[in-house]
Amino acid sequence: MGKMEVGRKTTGWAARDPSGLLSPYTYTLRETGPEDVHIRIICCGICHTDLHQTKNDLGMSNYPMVPGHEVVGEVVEVGSDVSKFTTGDIVGVGCLVGCCGGCSPCERDLEQYCPKKIWSYNDVYIDGQPTQGGFARATVVHQKFVVKIPEGMAVEQAAPLLCAGVTVYSPLAHFGLKRPGLRGGILGLGGVGHMGVKIAKAMGHHVTVISSSNKKKEEALKDLGADDYVIGSDQSKMNELADSMDYIIDTVPVHHTLEPYLSLLRLDGKLILMGVISNPLQFLTPMVMLGRKVITGSFIGSMKETEEMLEFCKEKGLSSIIEVVKMDYVNTAFERLEKNDVRYRFVVDVEGSKLEA
């Protein structure tokens, strides 16, 4: 693994600079190594992180950059040592494509916390070549970072689960919150938040959506099945809900105060941060101390958790609410995502799109 096969080209849509504007870009795929899986991409979800990365919001972007880390496709070739997959399998690839394999997180099958993890795009692979994401015709990925999509699950529905779905499932599983009868809050009703409502409800929880306006109230209660809906600025309703929740999943990706939400947690309640925010968040320590409350974070999920989550969603019949678009609409989709104008995840129909200029 690591050689470049001369002439094996693919086309994707890449950002060239912090404007984030995507356009056709042709590049070379690496040779399929002994443990690699060559995948023809069918579709790919659009995550808020794609927006951050293409616009260099985190100050770490490298161009040209083909984004996309909610990738579903068909296996077209496998390496000689690949045992989990065969040609024709429908598979998924999430946020990561590599790890060191020897650190403490890797030894515990928590590769998302490996200090040497390799991102699906905007990173450098072990062969020294840049990684590129799922807004492209094809990709080559080590078998460890590929998962089978359960039979019968629609590919466009599976895509958002590979990031948004496992991002919610992982902390609920890790912190012992999968048991029924709990009361939880979902702060922010976007791509991750809407899956949070669905997964938490499927686990048997009483779920309250916490939002900044009433715009999504009817959808949250009727379409997603939430039990309650509260506007964070509604002090009367927030007071009613004080000390009532076992956990809150905070998906908000912009700066916000934490005290109003900490007040909703009961003794030993957990505020689980998931939004990527570049500015420091603040809180008054008594808000945590006087209820032995926990402010913690969680980052995507492991490959094992991804497999568990996909099976859980199949068993419970869960699906994401999506809007399917072609690649020539992707720049408009990014603009709408920036304005929070999507219900609730864009998925790019890569297979059905014209990628070439």
Image (cartoon, grey):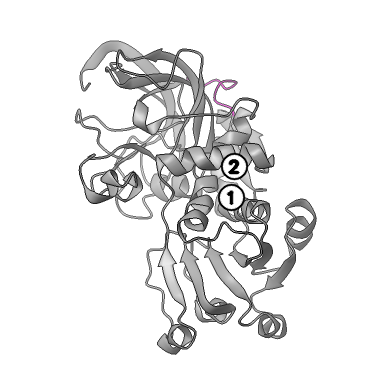
Magenta-highlighted residues: 349-356
- The three-letter code of the residue at mark 2 reads Phe
Callout 1 crowding tier (Cα within 10 Å): few <14, some 14–19, many ≥20? many
Q: Quadrant of residue 134?
A: top left
For marks 2 and 1 on the same chain, the one whose residue lies earlier in the sequence: 1
User: 30 left or right of 159?
Assistant: left
Q: In the rendering, at what x and y percent does residue 175 appear?
A: 47, 61
- Mark 2: which secondary structure? helix
Q: Is residue 269 above or below residue 173?
A: below
Mark 2–mark 1 CB contact (< 8 Å): no
Query: Residue 334 appears at what percent x and percent y?
Result: 54, 44
For the residues carrying marks 2 and 1, which lies nearer the camera in this image?
2
Specify whether residue 350 is painted magenta: yes
Mark number displayed over residue 145: none
Q: Which mark is residue 312?
A: 2
The structure residue drawn at horizontal position 65% and vertical position 26%, both measured from the top left corner, is: 152
Instruction: Give the amino acid type for the residue marked by disc 1 in the picture.
Output: Gly
How many numbered marks, from 0 up?
2
As displayed, is residue 356 above or below residue 192? above
Q: Is residue 164 visible?
A: yes
Residues under labels 2 and 1: Cα distance? 18 Å
**What is the magenta segment's predominant secondary structure?**
loop
Residue 247: x and y, percent?
Answer: 55, 68
- The answer to whether residue 332 shows anywhere in this view is no
For label 1, the residue is 191
Residue 262 shown left or right of residue 182 in the figure: left
Q: Which of the pair 343/150 is nearer the observer?
A: 150
